[in-house]
Amino acid sequence: MFEKIMFATTGTPICDNAAHVAFDIAKKYNSKLFMFHVLGLPSRGFSQVVTDIRSGQPEQIDADYVSWVKEELKNTYDKYLKDCRECEIDSVAGVPSTEILRKARQKDIDLIVMGAHSRQEETGAARYRGAVGTNMQHVARGARCPVLIVSRPCTTCLWYFSNIVFGTDFSKASFSAFLFASKLAKEIGSKLYIFHALDMSAVHAGKVISQEDIEARILEARKKIDKTYLPHLRDYDNFDIDIWEGIPYVEILKYSRAKNADLIVMAHHTKEIDPDQAILGGTVEQVVLRASCPVASVNHPDKVRD
């Protein structure tokens, strides 16, 4: 399923959790791994001087500098490379998200693995800002393949992936996420949990919703799941369906922990707008920041169709 995996890295400790997941998936699925690092932005126009993304210092781009960066990446991930079947290391200058997307298209990548942030200081600050990294947002928006986002050590992953939670809001993009989740579950025999969080945020705005109305909306959501997703599972019966009411990202996180999920799959935005113009949805963003397992953001159906 994953013939080609891209691990987008800054070569700093902030990407260590993503590295662990990327190399383990490549090993399990015998994939070719593309380790990709963007050097930094040219200082002006076609200048050969870049601001190194790791050190923040100006550096002259030449063959020696690029070779040094690649060697540093080899040294950084030496313990993983020993068990990797095939790994291609590349480094270029430019806007990180743009170059990652360009490389993914050139190499026809099946899965991009990256961290939620590109700078160490963003991790702690994210708790107060409630925001993920800009590069990750842009990659999630533009990628033609699933993007696996790893923001914390994966404590529940048992040889990838045993319990997959698919969170849906019934959008068009959610169906692409379902295709990815169900295809992966069928291929490796995982338990698939189809989950919908009935949005009760209106209650916090002062609107009173009766219990009868809540039950009616739950029943309606169950009918949508039965009609939209079950016909595509065919003979696959290793799945559960659950609908909880509450704040969507909170309920998804609670549900994934209750089910010991080692992967959460969601659409990368939650509104019916052009995916190419969408930004990372608020619900997905909060799940990425707080989930104890990797989160797969799926935008387009290109790589997830049967």
Image (spheres, helix red, strand yellow):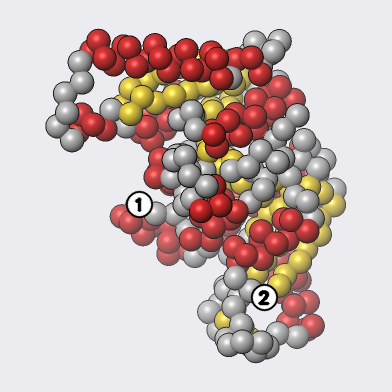
Residue 248: image x %, image y %? 37, 32
Q: Quadrant of the N terminus?
A: top right
Instruction: Tell me if residue 56 comes above or below residue 142 in the rendering.
Output: below
Instruction: Tell me if residue 66 comes above or below residue 235 in the rendering.
Output: below
Residue beneath disc 1: 130
Q: Say the numbered circle drawn on residue 93.
A: 2
Residue 61: image x %, image y %? 70, 85
Is residue 270 visible in the rendered image? The answer is yes
Q: Quadrant of the C terminus?
A: top right
Name the one closer to the observer, 278 or 284.
278
Residue 187: image x %, image y %? 74, 25
Q: Is residue 303 left or right of residue 181?
A: right
Gap in angstroms between the C-alphas marked 1 and 2: 29 Å
Instruction: Tell me if residue 92 comes above or below residue 106 in the rendering.
Output: below
> What amino acid is labelled 2 in the image?
Ala
Q: Residue furthest right?
A: 85
> What amino acid is labelled 1 in the image?
Gly
Q: Residue at point 47% right, 12% down?
A: 223
**Which callout, 1 or 2, points at the residue further toward the start of the chain?**
2
Within 10 Å of disc 1 (Cα), the crowding (few <14, some 14-19, many 20+) is few
The answer to the question of whether label 1 and label 2 lie on touching residues, with beta carbons closer than 8 A, is no
Is residue 153 visible in the rendered image? The answer is no
The quarter holding residue 301 reads top right
Q: Residue at point 14% right, 32% down?
A: 206
Q: Is residue 300 left or right of residue 74?
A: left
Q: Say the numbered circle drawn on residue 200.
A: none
